[in-house]
Amino acid sequence: MSGQRDGVAGLKVISDGGEACRAMSGLGTKDGETRIRLAGNDTALRGATSRWDAPVASPSTGRGGRGPCATLPGRMANRGPHHTSNAPMAEMIRIANAGGYWGDDLSQFRRQVELGPVDVVTLDFLAEITMSIMQKQRARDPRAGFARDFVAQVEQTLDLLVKRGTRAISNAGGVNPLACRGALLEMAQLHGHPIEVAAVAGDDLVGRLGELHATAVTLDNMEDGSAFAGIRDRVSSANAYFGAWPVVEALRTGAQIVVTGRCTDTGITLAPMIHAFGWRPDDWDRLAAGIVAGHIIECGAQSTGGNFTDWRRIRRYEDIGYPLLEVFPDGSFIVTKHAGTGGAVTVRTVREQLVYEMGDPRAYITPDVIADFGSVRLEQAGRDRVRVWGARGRPAPETLKVSASYFDGWKASGTLIISGPDAADKARAFAELFWKRLGLEFTERLTERVGHSACWGPLAPPTDPPEVLLRLSVRDSDRTKIERFSKMVPAVILSGPPGVAVTGGRPEAQEVVAYWPALVPRDRVKPRLVSRDGERTLDWPTPVVEPRRAGPLPRERFPRARGAAKPVAVPLVALAHGRSGDKGDTANIGVIARAPEIYPWLRRTLTAAAVKRRFKGLCRGRVERYEVPNLLALNFLLHESLGGGGTVSLRLDAQGKTLAHALLAMEVRAPRALLEAAARGDRADGRTAPRAVPPRRPRPSRRVPTGRRARPAPRARKR
């Protein structure tokens, strides 16, 4: 990639077989230099503007190569499944994310490749509802069932991919990865740029449900134990989650683009690391590091300032940069973004993403490893650069998770715009007359006043808005009841208070696609790889190991806040920041102290009982709390809080995205000294912490006889 610039290009290999790289303990910046600490020795890497194709010494021959990943065909070495040789190894690879969901900004794929050197671009497209939609598409057309947007993205970026050798990995294959591969090959051929494309299939279990049942694989609900037999006839999709290893095999074929079916979003990020560095299937700590890295970048701009609590501190949202990883053989990595783009990469933006959609932070379960987020460490390593290290891992489970979806009735939502004065009262009156006139009972019904209390419900503060969007929703198994509801929405606008209009016309009945999580033994599901070499079935290299509990964490020590102890009343957001998400009908809220001095107070104050009281009326189940002291965080799981979750829910915020801010708005009493600590933390966020400089040793004094003048010390000669 002649002419492309990079902050750490021109790295020199200083060890044989990359062993020193495995001992790498970190990367930081000092005085404009980039330093990598290898086995305790600082090696300054000057010339931050060296070309990507600058000569690099090969670890085995000492001869020059081309750039940090010169040893990799297409920038990644083709190794066997248990690589142990002293063949040249990549010193660092760059992995960029260009999309966290189907509907993300399609232009980011080309932008990530165009703005700087990147080895691999990953894109995540799949969710339960998209899998069900794709199954219906494939039923109508056997050539459909994948994310066609991905084919368009590759087409728009094809010239750069061919020129630079950048690889792309995506689960855009949906329920038909082979058709996705075919569409990509056909498109590239039409443009005169043939490329190698591999597809990973075998995760689709819809056609195997009878076979699995016959062999006592029940697929009962892994969360509540419900019998799968009760929904079997209504299942529209069922896919086993694959991890990194089938993708690793696809990369070994030399494919430049790899498309998969239901592969974890962390797995498509971990795979190129395994391939580049030769990590073994039982190298649990390094595999866990790759999972942590994948979790940080899997949601696109959420790690670079998007959806960030302190949003006013983020510059140029319109030009926000998507995340980029610089990964090293020991599993440590830098989170960054392309220079000159908007957004920010700070310890806080990364922490918020780490606690997003988190369950038990000590047991982040994937098909490849169980990652322990309680051991992860972060530090600011320069502007828009956060170093991450210390991840620990445990053996992967013997089972794979299955994500199934099934038909669960019908739903509809209709809206009326209601103007002031007294808009909230008018909306309440309209809702009352509507439900009375309709006179039907539904499985579930919901009234929301958008602009007044739709997001937070009973937690919303009193307000007198100038207008309210009244949103009425119903769900039921009887479609005729849903249709009667739809006809009534526009029929009441002249029957109540003034200043009302229908928005959007008569609502339409929509299918409800519900989510069903289950487990399947790993050995009952085998991946299939299709590449230029043909089709073959893959075995899982992950060893079956007795499950292990997470070990005790080292005791964290937190500084005491200095200053006034007088308590003051403030919103929690003055002392903490956070992010929320969903796992089915469970909301997750991660709350992070703004300074280490605040964390002991946060741990004492924000109990599970306090959070349960705060969300009274929204949270119908129990609240669990997990402590994550290494991240200054508490993670809360609010069960039965999202109206069934996903597409079952009638809530406008069916994924709990707004609940963190409902919690952060809670008034608390805290010592003024903690507010001062929070202010210091705010000022320091995004800045590199000053490194301690050892004091100079004083020169030994020269004893001067009484009555004689001391001669000046001789000056050092210039060399």
Image (tube, rainbow, N blue to C red):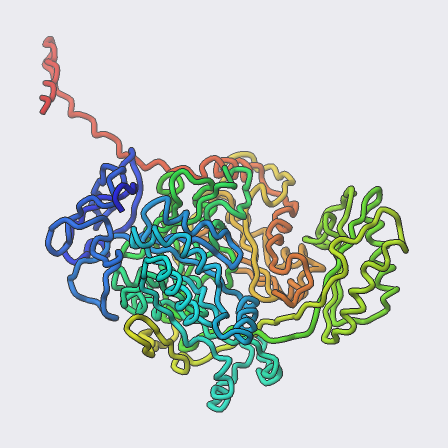
Image side of residue 407 versus residue 631, left or right = right
Q: Is residue 475 above or below residue 93?
A: below
- The residue nearer to you, when weighing 498 against 370, is 498
**Residue 447: image location, x then y, percent:** 76, 59
**Residue 687: image location, x then y, percent:** 41, 37
**Residue 505: image location, x then y, percent:** 76, 57
Q: Residue furthest top?
A: 707
**Who's the residue at 48% across and 67% down the image?**
146
Q: Is residue 384 above or below residue 260?
A: above
Image side of residue 502 versus residue 264, left or right = right
**Who's the residue at 49% across and 75% down the image?**
142
In this orientation, does residue 379 appear? no
Q: Residue furthest bottom?
A: 214
Viewport quadrant of the C terminus: top left
Image side of residue 657 versus residue 53, left or right = right
- The residue nearer to you, when weighing 392 against 6, is 6
Image side of residue 150 versus residue 655, left or right = left
In this orientation, does residue 511 appear? yes
